[in-house]
Image (tube, grey):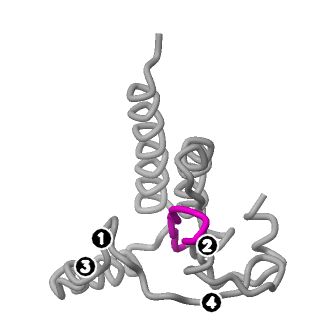
């Protein structure tokens, strides 16, 4: 019989495997080598900047913001927090296969997140007409 911990671990491994597979496919077959060199150099530069060490950590308080939802209605983070925990995910858009897999991982856990009183909010520069299909 599967315990919740075993299911969590299996779901996490599945999402990680899917992300690794797509990354390997794009790095090996789709992204041109000159573009990979630029991407790798910028990734190294970003890592060396130690910017991530100054980022919010799980459990930190985020600054309030108001952004439009998929219907164009304003959504305020602090209003959502009054309802419970909020998982904020940054998402480039529906065109990004890697991002879609990342969101699918959250979708697999959505029922559990809701059971714990939380919700997932995906922030994207994508226009609302595309965000509606992503929201579903």
- The answer to whether residue 123 is above or below residue 19 is below
| Foreground tag (2 vs 4) | 2
Pinpoint residue 101: horizontal percent, then vertical percent: 56, 54
- Mark 3–mark 4 distance (CA, rounded to whole Å): 24 Å
Tell me which label, 2 or 4, sits earlier in the chain: 4
- The answer to whether residue 63 is above or below residue 1 is below
**Label 1: which secondary element:** loop
Instruction: Name the residue carrying label 3.
Output: 52
**Label 4: which secondary element:** strand
Region in magenta: 81-90
- Mark 1–mark 4 distance (CA, rounded to whole Å): 21 Å
What residue lies at 55% left-to-right and 62% top-to-bottom?
A: 84
Instruction: Name the residue carrying label 4.
Output: 66
Pinpoint residue 86: horizontal percent, then vertical percent: 53, 65
81 left or right of 48? right
Q: Are marks 3 and 4 in contact (CB under 8 Å)?
A: no
Instruction: Name the residue carrying label 2.
Output: 80
Q: Quadrant of residue 57?
A: bottom left
Q: Let me know if residue 85 is in the magenta part.
A: yes
Instruction: Name the residue carrying label 1.
Output: 57
- Mark 1–mark 3 distance (CA, rounded to whole Å): 9 Å
66 left or right of 24? right
47 left or right of 134? left
């Amino acid at each position: 019989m599967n315990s919740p911990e075993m299911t969590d671990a299996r779901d996490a491994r599945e999402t990680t495997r899917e992300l690794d597979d797509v990354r390997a496919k794009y790095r090996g077959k789709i992204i041109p080598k000159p573009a990979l060199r630029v991407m790798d150099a910028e990734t190294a530069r970003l890592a060396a900047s130690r910017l991530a060490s100054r980022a919010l950590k799980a459990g930190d308080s985020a600054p309030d913001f108001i952004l439009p939802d998929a219907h164009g209605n304003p959504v305020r983070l602090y209003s959502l927090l009054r309802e419970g925990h909020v998982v904020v995910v940054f998402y480039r858009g529906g065109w990004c296969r890697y991002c879609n897999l990342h969101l699918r991982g959250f979708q697999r856990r959505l029922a559990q997140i809701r059971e714990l009183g939380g919700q997932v909010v995906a922030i994207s520069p994508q226009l609302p007409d595309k965000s509606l299909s992503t929201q579903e």
